Image (cartoon, grey):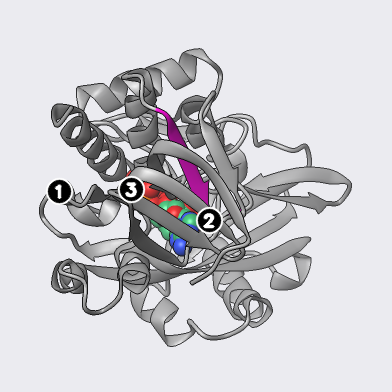
Amino acid sequence: MTSDRQDSVSDVAVIGAGMAGLACARALVEAGLRVRVLDKGRGIGGRMATRRAQVAGAEMRFDHGAQYVTALDPGFATLLEAAEAAGAAAVWDSSGQRPRYAGVPGMSALPRFLATGLDVRQGVQVQALAPAGGGWTLHAGDAAFTADRVVLTVPAPQAAAILGTDHPFAAALESVEMAPCLTLMAAFPETDAPGMRFRADESHPLAWIARDSSRPGRARPGLSGWVAQAGPAWSAQHLEAPPEETAVAMLPLLADALGLDPAAALHASAHRWRYARVTRPLGAPFLADADAGLWLGGDWCLGPRVESAWQSGQAVAADILSRG
Ligand SMILES: Cc1cc2nc3c(=O)[nH]c(=O)nc-3n(C[C@H](O)[C@H](O)[C@H](O)COP(=O)(O)OP(=O)(O)OC[C@H]3O[C@@H](n4cnc5c(N)ncnc54)[C@H](O)[C@@H]3O)c2cc1C
């Protein structure tokens, strides 16, 4: 493969600016390494995502990926406390065993907080990795990036596509299972009727419904904002439909669940997450071929939560640093 542009060398290239990649990159940078993070997306945070929409003259924010974050790991709890102190996160709900945090003003504020000061290049889709001179060349369209070591933190099926079917990690990646999720973002005129913050019901086509406008910093006078996630079966069944059709199909389900008239909706849009939730994790914090300088991490290593992604990223960084 030839590339028109060759970028400068970094010690470590991290592919993916989600929680796993950012946690890894931050730990490596704090240890003094030169790290570059590459992400194909326009924003930072991967599945910790926030979308803006103009609704009835107001700018609304919808968290269409991860809904909230909880911490079991003391290190992750420390990160959430630091984000809260910086105004990038706040407790959304305290009814469970552990506080549920949300990013402020949107969920993506939390990964952006973690990315502060990091060298993150957005809009860079890495297609292939090639060993080069004891390190790696990363090919992304007409650009190439060179690094001594590579950390790949994209969802397992996407990592498999980059590495190829004959890679030694192919079987391990194949063993991981991830379910899709179709998400609806909707706004209605505010009513007193549905006072709930969220509802989880695996038996309903919309397995999760949250009043997005109940999150810290999201309230808009006269408006209620909602995010609804279809369950894995409904999502798989409708996965290939265009987002406009998905929104049309999901809106009546949401309106029915809330006791509202779908015709009253002021906004409805949908997002497709092809690899949303880990249903069968790897069962180890990362994959590594340290001699080759290649590490793989992400939520898919440990479980379906933001914290799992953070733990995997931390574990990759610790392994790299332990090798000097
Ligand atoms: C709808 C939904 C709801 C969820 N709800 C919750 C919740 O309430 N609580 C919770 O804890 N977790 C929740 N999760 C799961 C949580 O979002 C993930 O576990 C976590 O964000 C994964 O982080 P990650 O860094 O492993 O992967 P990602 O966030 O997916 O990051 C991977 C990054 O890699 C980039 N990438 C992919 N391919 C390439 C490429 N070829 N080149 C360059 N970049 C590439 C992507 O753009 C992405 O930014 C939810 C997920 C979804 C989708």
In the rendered structure, find residue 70 and report the number of the disc placed on it: none
Prevalent SS, magenta region:
strand
For this rendering, which residue is in front, 282 or 133? 133
Tell me, yes or no, whether the two marked residues, 3 and 1, touch with CB atoms within 8 Å: no
Q: Amino acid at mark 2?
A: Ala
Is 227 above or below relative to 93? below
Q: How many marks?
A: 3
Q: Which residues are magenta?
A: 34-41
For this rendering, which residue is in front, 70 or 120? 120
Image quadrant of residue 154? bottom left
In the rendered structure, find residue 144 and report the number of the disc placed on it: 2
Report the mark closest to the observer, 2 or 3: 2
Residue carrying label 3: 150
Q: Secondary structure at mark 2?
A: strand
Q: Secondary structure at mark 3?
A: strand
Is 118 above or below relative to 58? above
